[in-house]
Image (spheres, rainbow, N blue to C red):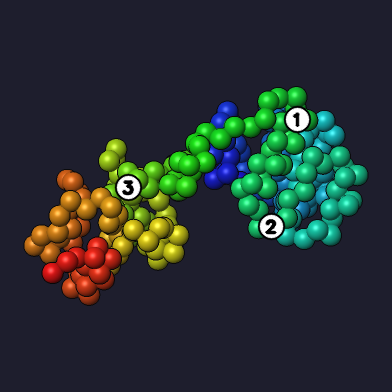
């Protein structure tokens, strides 16, 4: 939900609650426009939480099962999302929330075209967009990955293995601790790959794979 909300224009803040009791406390304190509630909550389950909330609060129910879908409308919920949730389906629910609040339809903070070249990663408590066209390389730092771009760097708790799975094919592992953007390579020299001012070492085992990806002509 956090990564989806980061893509939407005009979202002032979002709060998370790890249990139903905390959620009830946050939602009854005021200042919250809408809630996305998972039915499977410790302490106070989703159904009990729904009973305790005012009907005027737009609520979207989230569940891995549709068993509660029909009954949820007894609580005047705005929408019911089944896991896994896609971004288009999330936007549909958010539009219904905005309609109920009497506000304008939600807009993307980033265009669809730019979104295809953007990933969102957690940097501490923030969710940060990474423009893949500006991403030079990624360096492993213990359990973290450092994203190095034209504009600076971002550190996120995500594995290199996971990044290899989700990044486009132009991102290639050149070393146990480095992934590079082949489209940003300026030269390869002395066992290193240069991406402007950024430099990454090439391990012997990864050199052949890199040269094959680059279609180097002998």
Is residue 120 shown to the viewer in this render? no
Image-quadrant location for residue 65: bottom right
Determine crowd level at label 1: few under 14, some 14-19, many 20+ residues with C-alpha closer than 10 A: some
Question: In 3D space, how far apart are the residues under numbered discs 3 and 2 (Cα atoms)?
Answer: 31 Å
Q: Nearer the viewer, mark 2 or mark 1?
A: 1
Question: In 3D space, how far apart are the residues under numbered discs 2 and 1 (Cα atoms)?
Answer: 23 Å
Q: Which residue is mark 2?
A: 83
Q: How many marks?
A: 3
**Residue found at the very far bottom of the displayed protein:** 205
Determine crowd level at label 2: few under 14, some 14-19, many 20+ residues with C-alpha closer than 10 A: few
From the top left corner, tell me how far across and down residue 29 is, in percent. 71, 30
Q: Which residue is mark 1?
A: 99
Toward the viewer: 68 or 202?
A: 202
Toward the viewer: 213 or 24?
A: 213
Is residue 181 shown to the viewer in this render? yes
The residue lying at 24 percent from left, 65 percent from top is 215
From the top left corner, tell me how far across and down residue 107 is, in percent. 59, 32
The residue lying at 18 percent from left, 61 percent from top is 201
**Residue found at the very far left of the displayed protein:** 190
Name the element at disc 2: loop
Whether the residues at callouts 2 and 1 have beta carbons within 8 Å, the answer is no
Image-quadrant location for residue 96: top right
The residue lying at 64 percent from left, 46 percent from top is 88
| Horizontal relation, residue 216 to residue 109: left or right | left
Name the element at disc 1: helix
Question: In 3D space, how far apart are the residues under numbered discs 1 and 3 (Cα atoms)?
Answer: 37 Å
The residue lying at 27 percent from left, 60 percent from top is 178
Determine crowd level at label 3: few under 14, some 14-19, many 20+ residues with C-alpha closer than 10 A: many
Q: Which residue is mark 3?
A: 135
Toward the viewer: 118 or 143?
A: 118
């Amino acid at each position: 939900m956090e990564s989806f909300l980061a893509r939407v224009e005009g979202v002032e803040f979002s709060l998370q609650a790890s249990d139903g009791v905390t959620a009830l406390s946050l939602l009854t304190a005021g200042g919250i426009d809408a809630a996305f509630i998972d039915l499977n909550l410790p302490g106070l389950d989703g159904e009990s939480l729904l009973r305790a909330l005012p009907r005027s609060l737009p609520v979207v129910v989230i569940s891995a099962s549709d068993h509660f879908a029909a009954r949820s409308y007894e609580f005047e919920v705005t929408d019911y999302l089944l896991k896994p949730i896609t971004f288009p389906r999330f936007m549909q629910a958010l539009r219904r929330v905005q309609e109920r609040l009497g506000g304008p339809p939600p807009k993307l903070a980033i265009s669809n075209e730019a979104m295809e070249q953007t990933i969102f990663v957690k940097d501490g408590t923030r969710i940060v967009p990474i423009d893949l066209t500006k991403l030079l390389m990624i360096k492993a730092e213990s359990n973290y990955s450092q994203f190095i771009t034209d504009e600076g760097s971002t550190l996120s708790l995500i594995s290199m293995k996971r990044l290899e799975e989700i990044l486009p094919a132009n991102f290639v592992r050149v070393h146990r601790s480095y992934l590079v953007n082949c489209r940003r390579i300026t030269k390869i020299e002395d066992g290193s790959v240069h991406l402007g001012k950024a430099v990454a070492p090439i391990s012997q085992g990864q050199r052949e794979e890199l040269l094959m990806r680059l279609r180097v002509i002998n």
